[in-house]
């Protein structure tokens, strides 16, 4: 049987980390073959005390000091510290199914060229806002063909969340890019597929994810996704996925729509037809998620936040990284 390392970047997660660790401790896979590395970035909210108390009950859970306080550094720290055959990255906001590890290992047997496998995220809602956000993020209208969120595909994909990786892939394509504040897993997965290897999505691999509970946090998250995606494109000198361009095109259209008022009302009315179409489509897809009118309107509003924040971030990234050629170091504060 394969040895497994689970790497968890962590910073101030006192409300979630215990459930995450407990779910790992309850795995059906041979527990003596699993070692979990919690890479803490200096938590000061009681998280580290919770982890230390839990670690006392098992030598299979270890705490590492994430001195740089960034996610990719934490991931690389756990990867290099371990010697396991398979490395699984996990979020502290998650809670895995009892057969999570076993299903990951089993899925690798689908094809020898598979270097990464993953499953689907089941949203867990903390309040009404998080439930609305989760509904929007489980819709293809909200997140495109991100199958690990929509759960509507089994087979080869371009990326997964909380992937399991064969140890040898790190020798072949390197570690996670520590310059990236966001999108580090997408960028790493792009390197895997570009090198000719496969990523496989198996819906039987299940993981609960506690959805962000405010629109403000959601906006910041997707703004950063869009912003750092531009850097990834520059890094690889290509557009890694076509779906990333849609939100930027949408925001550009909104700016053009406003500018059309200077040209004339007829031009504005004509261009407004596309916005009407967007609103109708958003409303239709929102009602598919929930037939209650008020809730559906809120879901449609969440669609707009997802698209607008990602698009604004992407355009800002174009401005900073391409037009102004700013250094990445000047933008690390965005992650704070």
Image: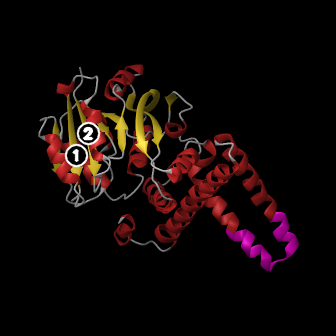
- Is 264 placed above or below 107 here? below
Q: Are marks 1 and 2 in contact (CB under 8 Å)?
A: yes
Please tell me whether residue 263 belongs to the stretch shown in magenta. Answer: yes
Most extreme residue toward the right is 266
Say which residue appears at 82% left-offset and 70% top-offset. Answer: 268
Q: Which residues are magenta?
A: 255-271
The answer to whether any part of residue 175 appears in the image is no
User: Is 298 displayed left or right of 163 in the figure?
Assistant: right
Q: Quadrant of the N terminus?
A: top left
Residue 178: x %, y % from top left: 31, 56
User: Is 287 displayed left or right of 180 in the figure?
Assistant: right
Please tell me whether residue 209 belongs to the stretch shown in magenta. Answer: no
Dominant secondary-structure state across the stretch colored magenta: helix
Q: Which residue is mark 2?
A: 21
For mark 1, give the secondary structure.
strand
Q: CA distance from mark 1 to mark 2?
A: 9 Å
Say which residue appears at 52% left-offset and 68% top-offset. Answer: 316
Residue 58: x %, y % from top left: 13, 35
Tell how many labels. 2
């Amino acid at each position: 049987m394969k040895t497994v390392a689970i790497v968890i970047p962590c910073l101030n997660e006192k409300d979630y980390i215990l459930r995450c660790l407990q779910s790992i401790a309850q795995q059906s896979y041979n527990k003596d073959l699993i070692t979990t590395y919690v890479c803490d970035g200096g938590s000061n909210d009681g998280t580290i005390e919770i982890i230390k108390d839990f670690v006392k009950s098992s030598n299979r859970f270890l705490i590492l000091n994430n001195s740089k306080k960034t996610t990719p550094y934490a991931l690389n720290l756990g990867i290099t510290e371990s010697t396991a055959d398979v490395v699984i990255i996990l979020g502290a906001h998650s809670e895995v199914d009892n057969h999570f590890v076993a299903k990951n290992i089993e899925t690798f047997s689908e094809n020898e060229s598979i270097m990464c496998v993953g499953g689907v995220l089941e949203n867990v809602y903390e309040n009404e806002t998080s439930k609305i956000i989760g509904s929007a993020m489980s819709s293809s209208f909200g997140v495109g063909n991100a199958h690990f969120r929509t759960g509507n595909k089994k087979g080869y994909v371009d990326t997964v969340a909380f992937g399991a990786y064969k140890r040898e892939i790190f020798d072949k394509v390197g570690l996670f890019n520590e310059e990236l504040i966001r999108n580090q897993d997408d960028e790493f997965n792009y390197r895997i597929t570009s090198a000719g290897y496969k990523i496989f999505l198996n819906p039987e691999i299940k993981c609960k994810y506690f959805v962000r509970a405010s629109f403000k946090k959601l906006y910041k998250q997707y703004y950063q996704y869009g912003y750092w995606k531009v850097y990834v494109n520059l890094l690889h000198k290509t557009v890694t996925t076509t779906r990333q361009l849609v939100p930027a095109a949408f925001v550009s259209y909104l700016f053009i729509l406003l500018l059309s008022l200077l040209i004339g009302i007829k031009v504005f009315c004509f261009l407004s037809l596309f916005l009407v179409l967007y609103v109708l489509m958003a409303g239709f897809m929102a009602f598919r998620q929930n037939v209650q009118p008020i809730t559906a309107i809120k879901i449609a509003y969440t669609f707009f936040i997802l698209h607008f924040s990602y698009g604004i971030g992407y355009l800002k990234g174009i401005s900073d990284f391409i037009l102004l050629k700013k250094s990445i170091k000047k933008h690390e504060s965005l992650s704070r």
